[in-house]
Amino acid sequence: MRLTRTMFPFWVLCAHPLWAQLDLLTPREASRIVERLPAVVGAAGRLSCHVRCEVISDPMHPATFDVEVHAACRTSFASSLLDRYVVNRRTGAVATWGDNPLSVGDHASDVLAHELVNQARSRILALAECRCLALEAARALPGWTDVNGSVDVEPSAVTGVPETIFHVIHKSATRPGETRAALYVDPRTGHVRDHRSGTEVMSARVGDLLGKLIALRTPPFLSDQDALSIALSVPTIAEVARRQNCSLILGEGYVPEEVSVTPACGGRYTEPGLVVNLRDGRVSDADTGKVLNVPKVLVLANRLVGAAQEARAHLREQVATKCGGTEPR
């Protein structure tokens, strides 16, 4: 039997290399495939409310996501769960959840899965980006921190291995001779390994660059504070926030790329909440899924989305300056 949901965010659960791979399906991509399944499309058509997919990560199965399909119109005495599936993050294949899984899907969902899997595989680091990481890692090797020295990095012609091998050479400005080493860069994760010691090479500069490369492969999401600002521009939510002993509870939940904003007074939820989409700032009713077309909300959301896109452009310029104009694939 597979494990049920865990209470921790999926990205900090396990140090297993699979969690860090850029070429595997994301939670949103997995949920998109499930949303296209015939059974889920049929359920959405029969219900009077919207259907949402909640993605749950199991640390014992890092190559898959559990995706639960819920109806938003549940009552306090009935479960919202309609069905649950398991999505293979490598292939996009979907199976029923449980001890005897069965493959599900049709032509439409299979075509979408193929498209998203290819999209995921295109996120691996380019050769120039791997070289840039190897250069930063080389500068962190013991004895290679001489600011006046030089470091040369050249890729090896060795093929057939998952990592890219780089030969690095350090020439000191104060002492004769040169030091040579080999570094392995995994284009699927950006992790750098020293061939001699077999250990990962990490430094503040390597971490900063890798963080930027990863960020360029994810959408320019709004922050939680952006989501809160957008929610507060909805009159009913702003009125609750002004009451004594009331606040707004932000919860990531399990729906990818969304943040829920729920009013609470005296420690209890009081009114229906909102859901803010972190890609476009769209606000919808948490129960019905209906989008709220409030002019003030739309103006603020557009402004914040524009700011996030500008920050992404600035980040791309920083990486291009450091790595010689590389672009994420």
Image (spheres, rainbow, N blue to C red):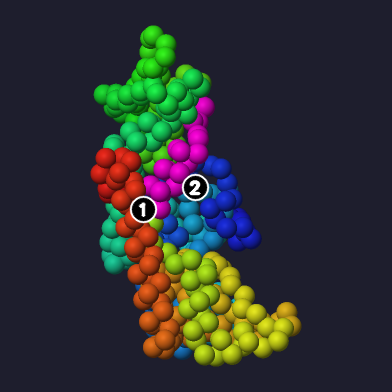
Pair 2/1: label in front: 1
* For residue 120, side relative to residue 233 (left or right): left
Question: Which residue is located at x 50 percent, y 39 percent?
Answer: 204
Q: Tell me the kind of residue under disc 1.
A: Leu
Place of residue 143 in the rendered image (x, y in percent of width and height, measured from the top left): 49, 20
Q: Tell me the kind of residue under disc 2.
A: Trp
Mark 2 or mark 1, which has the lower sequence index?
Answer: 2
Residue 212 vs residue 150, the one in the foreground: 150
Q: Which residues are magenta?
A: 198-215
**Residue highlighted by disc 2:** 19
Determine if residue 10 is in view: yes
Determine if residue 219 is in view: no
**Residue highlighted by disc 1:** 315
Place of residue 214 in the rendered image (x, y in percent of width and height, measured from the top left): 41, 49
Residue 324 vs residue 256, the one in the foreground: 324
Q: Secondary structure at mark 2?
A: helix
| Rendered position, 85 above or below 237 | above
Q: Residues within 10 Å of mark 2 (few under 14, many from 20)?
A: some
Question: Which residue is located at x 42 percent, y 57 percent?
Answer: 26
Marks 2/1: CA–CA distance: 24 Å
Q: Residues within 10 Å of mark 1 (few under 14, many from 20)?
A: some
Q: Secondary structure at mark 1?
A: helix
Residue 46 vs residue 162, the one in the foreground: 162
Place of residue 6 in the rendered image (x, y in percent of width and height, measured from the top left): 62, 59
Q: Is residue 319 magenta?
A: no
The residue most toward the top is 176
Q: How many marks?
A: 2
Q: Main secondary structure of the magenta part?
A: helix
Place of residue 291 in the rendered image (x, y in percent of width and height, measured from the top left): 42, 84
